[in-house]
Amino acid sequence: MNPVELADGRVVTIAPLTPGDAPELAEAIRHADPETLYRRFCGPPPKVTPKLLKYLTELDFERRYALVARDQDGQGVAIARYEATKEPGVAEVAVVVAPGWRHAGLATALVRLLAEAALVRGFDRFTATYLADNIPVAELLDEAGGKRVISEGIADAVVSLRPRA
Ligand SMILES: CC(C)(COP(=O)(O)OP(=O)(O)OC[C@H]1O[C@@H](n2cnc3c(N)ncnc32)[C@H](O)[C@@H]1OP(=O)(O)O)[C@@H](O)C(=O)NCCC(=O)NCCS
């Protein structure tokens, strides 16, 4: 995939996540700070097992799709994914950006790319579940036209996917 320039001038390359990325993903989850993990998984993170890694990296790129952003040295700095839900046309989206790469539009760029991929695969809505006090993700989804319902500290947002003008 093409390089993407972020708002702070840094450049990442974005590519599909593959099974070959499993060892790096395992290290990233093991070494991520507790707050990032808590926010990504809306609670305690799952244990890193071969089964989990297989699940996270073996994707069909139709109903389960993920992108990884890498820095100029090839180090992974963000992952975004969608997974089809039981509801036709609806996929759940999740994104995580390494702390040193935040506030530069990376999550926004990844979610846009995911939305484009999802649209051509027949999805018309993204849902996202996140801790209600997670302002960056709330803003990201609001900006994309999301509507949210908050219950017991957990927000559920729905975003209608539209082709970009
Ligand atoms: C949520 C997260 C993915 C955002 O990544 P990011 O690359 O910094 O996001 P962006 O730079 O694209 O910014 C997205 C929006 O959040 C806003 N934002 C970013 N960081 C912010 C902060 N600390 N406080 C307030 N707003 C913030 C931006 O202004 C932007 O709003 P806009 O779309 O209205 O312009 C990142 O903070 C993260 O990985 N958090 C931990 C994991 C997580 O919470 N995942 C979401 C649950 S699935």
Image (cartoon, helix red, strand yellow):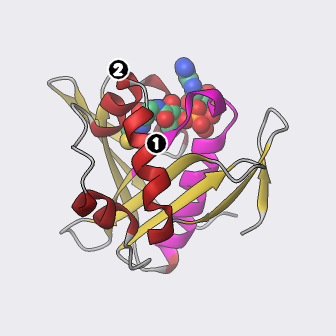
Magenta stretch: includes residue 112: yes
Residue 92 horizontal/vertical position (percent): 32, 56
| Residue 10, picture quadrant | top right
| In front of the other: 46 or 116 | 46
Kindly identify the residue that appears in the image at 56 percent across and 57 percent down. 68
Residue 125 horizontal/vertical position (percent): 38, 61
Q: Distance from label 1 to label 2 (Cα)?
A: 24 Å
Magenta stretch: includes residue 105: yes
Q: Amino acid at mark 1?
A: Ala
Quadrant field for ligand 1: top right
Kindly identify the residue that appears in the image at 31 percent across and 35 percent down. 130
Q: Which mark is residue 133?
A: 2
Q: Nearer the viewer, mark 1 or mark 2?
A: 1
Q: Mark 1 falls on what kind of element?
A: helix
Q: Which residue is mark 1?
A: 28
Magenta extent:
94-119
Q: For the image shown, how many numbered marks are present on the structure?
A: 2
